[in-house]
């Protein structure tokens, strides 16, 4: 992976300081379109050409933005300090009810922000999870920093900071602290793998990991009993399908591997494809069985997937 520079506008901390609450009930779930970015491979980005699909209202879910700032670490690019602190405005989707609910930290991909995935995050929250998606300074084009995907290790530390902040902050009453999962797409999947299995970046509070279209891991891998759900489409035009096959072999942990037959990179998680309900259901069922311990286990997930012509399923203990 190589850095892909973009604009260099500085993000004002004051602009991030507000706590904004927006109810999804009564309105559609519409996405924000981000600036185009170079693909990670020369192949055309067929699945990345559309913003998240507008869906029906989800009255049981509310959305808010929490202004989180880690003032112990800077934003650095090319050896230059761009900011003395890491502002991490985090979009949070919360289901109705008293809770407590499992916490899922969702990690967006390169050149994307949380709202590019709000259809998926809101849908997952409606299944009984608090879903928190941080905006990373060097991945989200809305932040104004040069985009730079060489800082995935910093983002793994950001994820741990978000977990600490939310489980110890004003949202703590809604959260089951022992039930934490990390879900990521594309570069975000790489970050999720680092948090789950990367040497020096593992967060032991994480009980389950979902990696959708990850790159192979390039750091030391820690053997673990933390379960992993791997997802990727066979027609992925950004990350070669062989990448998830490599990760399946690399990770020394219980792995469930869902192949979306004929699916591209972004479209299934963005919405509006035949694979979208399969992806939504698989992730919710996997997290129910692992992080939340609310279902019989992943064997039931395997039985459901076996009947679908859209997927191929494999696993290892």
Image (cartoon, rainbow, N blue to C red):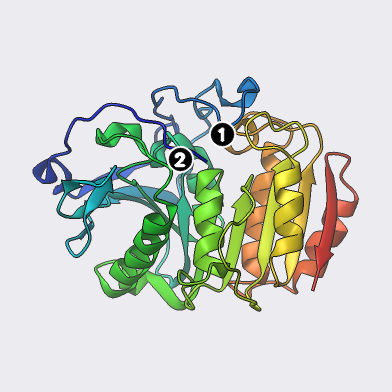
Disc 1 is placed on an element classified as helix
Residue 73's spot in the image, x, y percent?
Answer: 22, 61
Is 219 or 236 nearer to us in this picture?
219
Residue that badge 1 annotates: 270
Is 104 or 160 nearer to us in this picture?
160
Residue at image position (34%, 63%) is 162
Tell me the distance, in whole angstroms, between the alpha carbons under discs 2 and 1: 8 Å
Residue 126 visible in this rendered orientation of the protein? no
First reached walking from the N terminus: tag 2 or tag 1: 2
Q: Residues within 10 Å of mark 1 (few under 14, many from 20)?
A: many
Residue 194's spot in the image, x, y percent?
Answer: 52, 62
Q: Is residue 28 above or below residue 188?
A: above
Residue at image position (59%, 33%) is 266
> In the displayed image of the protein, which residue is found farthest to the front?
79
Instruction: Say left or right for 23 vs 243.
Output: left
Check if mark 2's residue and mark 1's residue have beta carbons within 8 Å.
no
């Amino acid at each position: 992976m190589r850095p892909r520079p973009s604009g260099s506008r500085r993000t004002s901390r004051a602009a991030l300081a507000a706590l904004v609450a927006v109810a999804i009930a009564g309105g559609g779930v519409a996405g924000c379109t981000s600036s185009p970015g170079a693909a990670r491979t020369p192949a055309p980005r067929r699945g990345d050409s559309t913003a998240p699909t507008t869906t029906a209202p989800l009255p049981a879910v509310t959305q808010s933005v929490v202004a989180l700032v880690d003032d112990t670490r800077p934003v650095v690019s090319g050896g230059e300090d761009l900011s003395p602190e890491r502002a991490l405005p985090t979009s949070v989707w919360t289901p109705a009810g008293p809770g407590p609910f499992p916490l899922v930290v969702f990690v967006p991909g390169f050149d994307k922000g949380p709202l590019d995935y709000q259809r998926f995050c809101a849908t997952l929250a409606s299944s009984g999870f608090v879903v928190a998606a941080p905006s990373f300074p060097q991945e989200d084009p809305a932040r104004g920093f040069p985009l730079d995907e060489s800082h995935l290790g910093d983002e793994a530390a950001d994820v741990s900071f978000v977990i600490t902040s939310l489980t110890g902050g004003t949202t703590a009453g809604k959260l089951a602290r022992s039930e934490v999962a990390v879900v990521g797409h594309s570069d975000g999947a790489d970050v999720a793998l680092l948090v789950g299995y990367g040497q020096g970046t593992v967060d032991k509070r994480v009980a389950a990991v979902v990696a959708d279209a990850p790159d192979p891991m390039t750091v030391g891998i820690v053997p673990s009993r933390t379960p992993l759900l791997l997802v990727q489409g066979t027609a992925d035009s950004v990350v070669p399908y062989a990448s998830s096959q490599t990760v399946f072999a690399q990770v020394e942990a219980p792995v469930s591997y869902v192949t979306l037959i004929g699916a591209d990179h972004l479209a299934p998680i963005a919405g509006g494809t035949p694979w979208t309900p399969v992806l939504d259901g698989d992730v919710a069922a996997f997290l129910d069985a692992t992080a939340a311990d609310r279902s019989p286990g992943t064997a039931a997930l395997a039985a459901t997937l076996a009947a679908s012509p859209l997927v191929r399923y494999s696993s290892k203990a």
